[in-house]
Image: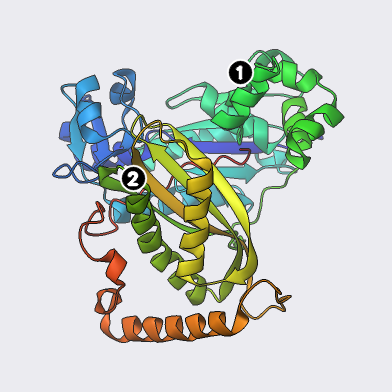
Amino acid sequence: MANQRVILHSDMNSFYASVEMMLDPSLRGKPVAVCGSTENRHGIILAKSELAKKAGVKTGMVNWEARQCCRDLILVPPQYDQYLKYSKLAHEIYYRYTDLVEPFGMDECWLDWTGSSVFGSGMEIAEAIRKSVREELGLTVSIGVSFNKIFAKLGSDMKKPDAITEISKEAYQEMVWPLPASDLIYVGRATTRRLAGYGIRTVGQLAALEPELLRRWFGINGIKLWQYANGTDASRVMHKDFVSPIKSIGHGITCNADLENETEVFKVMFELSQDVGHRLRVHELSAQGVQIFIRSKDLSYKQFQCRLPVRTQLPSEISTAGYQLFQNKYRWDQPVRAVTIRATELQPQNAADQLSLYVDNARRDRRIRLQDTVEEVRQRFGKGALTYGVLMGNLKMPDDGRDTVRMPSPMYQ
């Protein structure tokens, strides 16, 4: 890889479950899953060990469904403070070799080793990291070594656990192009289905397409797909101190009973939007768009989004837009199990805005002042000090946010 970029992607294997087994050696060699509440129906699988995975346990499964797949499954509650601790310790190991370390979630990182060959090759550094994580933390990593971030990530997924895979510029066509297109990062299920509809099922078939054709199908994201498949992505690995700007703020939850009608869905969206609006205020941002994720009883999900006529922080406007999306787009093939609502297209709250002739601005100003008062009361006396009548009673939601679930949000939908 002389004179080429050298990018590593390190993925801590079955991270949550591995930390649990390291902290409690009696769990080793057994199928283990980290999950939400086992007392309530809404508890779901957050992570699973390799043995549990081989038995058919999947992330996002409800606990009782996971037990049907694996009768000997051991369910343990999450210890997020420990996961964060070991994530930071792994980062400290990475920093020994480079300060270009970009996290991708708590358990994954890209590292840029370009220009540092005097200290060893990318494969040699990957092996040093693999050994250090195992010996110092008692955990394992899979590492991909390549000439760009996309193929480094793909390499770390190819062999698990505790393995290193190199995808070189000379060999990537042979190694990558026969793989399913869905193996590429950011290619979600909706994009996979759409590509399959055009007869495109492998990375190689995707790479062979004309870029302009992909642009017509997917817009600018189609060009990125073509670059990913052809190994021409040049996105850089950010410095370890880089703080990514907030691109969206959302809140999602798995309900402890299926939502059977639109009214129940609206109540959940309105409750979730209380948190979204509050966090927009904390970060002094306002939203120009709304996005919703709906997971059905069969664990399939749908994603919809829209643009708002005016930027907002108001929970009522965010939830109303989300509910209208739901009414217009969702087909009641299955009851709803989980809901996420997200504020998107964020801008500073004091940024100049074009007033709309179709919005009653005087009435809207009154709603904003009312929400200011609600926020002030909640800040002084707690979130539960003031609520809306429509949110009283059983919302089929957990009592707290510890089992909040982030819905999947593939880049291309």
Task: Report if the CB atoms under discs 1 and 2 are less than 8 Å apart.
Answer: no
Q: Is residue 306 above or below residue 390?
A: above
Which secondary structure lies at badge 2?
A: loop
Residue 339 relative to residue 163: left or right: left
In which quadrant of the rendered view does residue 235 lie? top right
Q: First in sequence: mark 1 or mark 2?
A: 1
Q: Where residue 86 sits: x, y (%)?
A: 37, 49
Q: Amino acid at mark 1?
A: Pro
Res 64 → quadrant: top left
Query: Which residue is labeled 1 in the image?
Result: 180
**Which residue: 42% across, 25% down?**
161
The local secondary structure at tag 1 comes to loop
Residue that carries the numbered disc 2 in the rendered image: 261
**In x, y percent, where is residue 88?**
43, 54
- Mark 2 is on which residue type? Asn
| Position of residue 199 measured from the top left corner of the image (x, y, whole percent) | 69, 14
Give the residue drawn at x 71%, y 74%.
Answer: 357
Q: Which mark is residue 169?
A: none
The answer to whether any part of residue 219 appears in the image is yes
Please tell me whether mark 1 or mark 2 is closer to you in this view. 2
The Cα–Cα distance between marks 1 and 2, rounded to whole angstroms, is 38 Å
x 21%, y 45%: residue: 77
Is residue 2 something one can see in this rendering? no
Quadrant of residue 16 in the image?
Answer: top left
Residue 233 rendering spot, x and y as whole percentages: 76, 37
Instruction: Say which of 99 and 107 sits in front.
Output: 107
